[in-house]
């Protein structure tokens, strides 16, 4: 019924983008156990295990459970320019300035920005390129004041769940840089969530697949979890 | 007590659900050692095993570290056929952390632990709670853990107060073999030397150390203000007796060394300006007056005069300021100005300008870095008192948990320069690390 009404309302690109963002950010909080698989061009694989706590749009805490050389490494995001890294070997928290945001996150195909941000409307203007039975195809152009490292994004929005089936990221030179594919959509407590995210580098064909093993939603996470004090003990 | 701690750590290793560790094979060799490849005297290998048990309201963590010295060069045939090993075990860490102790906002950590303070990169003037681990003297800033009680209380507006009590002073671990950590003025008449280090009495509350730190955030910048009362980690001579050993004027020097008491007020900050990371850390040190008593022979039959000199009295300031940035091409730079190296104090504080650049390739499998240091040992006479160092390094990670690093340390300097003092230790290294 809701989908039926949208046909008549004729959403604009920015409205669709807002709905995507709202779907992403709908849960008040989330705790996820993640398996990350890094796939080389020759098919060889490396595996990482993480736990992620999220609250609201900004607050995120990542801790690595494996492999052994990164076990205990923690990454805390409080806002766009408040990032902290905990290195258990030194028992030290280091503030990370936002110059690293477009760098690879721990050797994966995700940048710090890709993992930290879920605010498309703040950074992009969207227009509809195409619409078919299942998808809206949006072109996202960066707003002049945004600090994103991409020249544009092409987002293929799933009409049923209002989450992207895939996103193509273009570098500053206008070349295809990365492709993100989302799979295994499911509903937990009336929220649509993504079960598997694949990020592929279009140049060297290296891939990182993030699979959600376990997810708890709206458990009433305390703000105390997203503090430097807790970053040390989330080891 | 030692038996109980040993039991605890072995119990933890045997029964803990999470066990890990690492093996480090270090190979440091002189660059300029003639025809043979000769290891530096402090070279060691290392094995560390750690356990970690996490419960909802508490954690129990411990680690054992073994350092292994080969007394003969592993590269020489005689060394391989007749190796002579020496293993030193260290109880590296063993602590219990209780979260929400009595009150929800109070955490308590008891046991042997590393308490890391300061926002600067490795050169932290305010990080003075734990003793230094200088067994590899070029691994600047490496610290051991110490027995301590630490509590932290979260306060309103995201502020936290941390209190530390360290009941017993622990001296630093120094490099094996002959390594000139400090600058000594050599006297050709001194033919024999005998040093005795006098440690603070253990079971005396007056010799315990205390510290407190308040940290939080203002306008998206992180700040902390700290106070420390305790001992400086490096001893100073408190008594020197010069004793004639023959009629030619040759002398024996008997030295007693003590650890000076000091108070420190620390301040640090970190944040960013237009995406550039910026940090600073200052320590204002107020030492207790430290006097050196020297007994000098004046004629024969030996008559002596006693002379007192004040080695420490006036407060002094040590600091580090730095910034870092990643360029669009992925090159990362990190620069710091450090006033007062980790063992410097009083009026003898040198300036060190450190710059490091690095770039990662193949998804962080390969990292190439180059660091440079410039030292000003005396601002009034820079031409005669300066030092410099270049440290290029290649780090390769062929697989997860395996790391190979290859690099060189090249140092030179003049006059009072510390880097100049270490210039005979120009070396290359090839290290292997395996984590499990």
Image: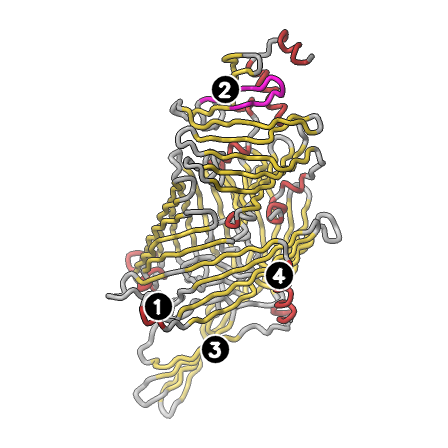
Residue picked out by circle 1: B73
Which residue: 61% across, 72% down? B202
Q: Nearer the viewer, mark 3 or mark 4?
A: 4
Q: Is residue A222 left or right of residue B374?
A: right
Front one among B291 and B8: B8
Q: Nearer the viewer, mark 3 or mark 2?
A: 2
Q: Tell me where residue A94 appears, x and y as whole percent.
A: 52, 46
Q: Tell me where residue B31 appears, x and y as whole percent.
A: 29, 61
Q: Measure the alpha-carbon separation of dots 3 and 1.
A: 31 Å
Element on which disc 4 rests = helix
Q: Nearer the viewer, mark 1 or mark 2?
A: 1
Q: Which residues are magenta?
A: A152-166
- Chain identifier of the residue bearing label 1 in the image: B
Residue picked out by circle 4: B14
Residue B196, which numbered label?
3
Are dots 3 and 2 on a single chain? no
Element on which disc 3 rests = strand
Residue picked out by circle 2: A140
Query: How many residues crowd mark 1 within 10 Å: few (<14), some (14–19), many (20+)?
Result: many
Q: Earlier in the sequence, mark 3 or mark 1?
A: 1
Q: Earlier in the sequence, mark 1 or mark 4?
A: 4
Predominant SS along the magenta part: strand
Q: Are marks 1 and 2 in contact (CB under 8 Å)?
A: no
Q: Are marks 1 and 4 in contact (CB under 8 Å)?
A: no
Instruction: Look at the image and name its color scheme.
Output: secondary structure
Q: Measure the alpha-carbon separation of dots 3 and 4.
A: 40 Å
């Amino acid at each position: 019924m809701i989908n039926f009404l949208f046909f008549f309302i004729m959403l604009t690109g920015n409205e669709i983008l807002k709905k995507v963002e709202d779907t992403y950010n709908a849960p008040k909080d989330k705790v996820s156990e993640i398996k990350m698989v890094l796939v080389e061009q020759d098919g060889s694989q490396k595996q990482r295990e993480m736990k992620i706590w999220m609250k609201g749009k900004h607050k995120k805490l990542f801790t690595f459970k494996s492999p052994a050389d990164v076990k205990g490494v923690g990454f805390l995001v409080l806002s766009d320019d408040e990032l902290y890294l905990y290195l258990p070997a030194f028992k030290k928290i280091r503030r990370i300035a936002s110059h690293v945001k477009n760098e690879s996150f721990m050797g994966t195909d995700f940048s710090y920005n890709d993992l930290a941000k879920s605010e498309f409307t703040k950074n992009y203007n969207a227009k509809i390129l195409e619409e078919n039975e299942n998808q809206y195809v949006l072109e996202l152009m960066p707003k002049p004041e945004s600090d994103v490292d991409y020249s544009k994004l092409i987002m293929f929005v799933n009409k049923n769940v209002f989450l992207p089936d895939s996103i193509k990221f273009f570098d500053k030179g206008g070349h295809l840089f990365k492709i993100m594919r989302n799979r295994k959509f499911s509903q937990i407590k009336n929220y649509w969530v993504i079960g598997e995210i694949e990020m592929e580098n279009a140049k060297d064909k290296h891939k990182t697949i993030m699979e959600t093993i376990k997810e708890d939603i709206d458990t009433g996470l305390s703000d105390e979890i997203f503090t430097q004090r807790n970053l040390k003990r989330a080891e | 007590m030692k038996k109980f701690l040993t039991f605890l750590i072995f119990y933890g290793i045997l029964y803990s659900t999470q066990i890990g560790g690492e093996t480090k094979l270090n190979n440091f060799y002189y660059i300029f050692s003639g025809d043979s490849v000769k290891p530096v005297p402090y070279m060691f290998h290392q094995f560390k095993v750690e356990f970690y048990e996490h419960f909802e309201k508490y954690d129990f963590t411990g680690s054992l570290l073994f350092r292994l010295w080969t007394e003969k060069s592993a590269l020489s045939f005689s060394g391989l056929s007749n190796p002579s090993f020496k293993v030193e075990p260290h109880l590296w860490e063993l602590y219990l952390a209780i979260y929400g102790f009595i009150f929800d906002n109070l955490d308590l950590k008891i046991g042997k632990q590393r308490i890391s303070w300061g926002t600067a990169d490795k050169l932290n003037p305010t990080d003075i709670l734990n003793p230094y681990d200088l067994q590899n003297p070029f691994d600047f800033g490496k610290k051991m853990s110490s027995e301590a009680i630490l509590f932290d209380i979260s306060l309103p507006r995201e502020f936290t107060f941390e209190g530390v009590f360290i009941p017993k002073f622990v001296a630093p671990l120094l490099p094996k073999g002959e390594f000139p950590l400090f600058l000594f003025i050599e006297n050709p008449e001194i033919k024999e030397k005998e040093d005795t280090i006098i440690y603070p009495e253990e079971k005396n509350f007056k010799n315990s150390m205390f510290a407190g730190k308040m940290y939080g955030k203002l306008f998206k910048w992180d700040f902390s203000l700290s106070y420390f009362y305790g001992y400086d980690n490096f001893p100073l001579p408190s008594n020197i007796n010069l004793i004639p050993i023959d009629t030619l004027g040759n002398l024996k020097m008997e030295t007693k060394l003590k650890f000076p008491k000091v108070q420190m007020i620390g301040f640090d900050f970190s944040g960013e300006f237009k995406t550039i990371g910026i940090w600073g850390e200052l320590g204002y040190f107020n030492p207790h007056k430290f006097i050196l008593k020297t007994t000098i022979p004046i004629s024969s039959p030996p008559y002596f005069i006693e002379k007192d000199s004040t080695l420490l009295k006036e407060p002094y300031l040590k600091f580090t300021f730095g910034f870092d940035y990643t360029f669009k091409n992925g090159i990362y730079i990190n620069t710091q100005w450090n006033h007062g190296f980790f063992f410097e104090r009083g009026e003898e504080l040198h300036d060190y300008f450190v710059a490091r650049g690095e770039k990662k390739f193949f998804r962080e499998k390969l990292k190439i870095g180059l660091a440079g240091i410039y030292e000003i040992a005396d601002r009034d006479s820079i031409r005669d008192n300066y030092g410099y160092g270049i440290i290029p390094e290649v780090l390769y990670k062929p697989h997860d948990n395996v790391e190979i690093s290859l690099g060189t340390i090249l140092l030179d300097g003049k006059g009072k320069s510390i880097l100049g003092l270490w210039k005979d230790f120009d070396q290359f290294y090839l290290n292997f690390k395996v984590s499990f």
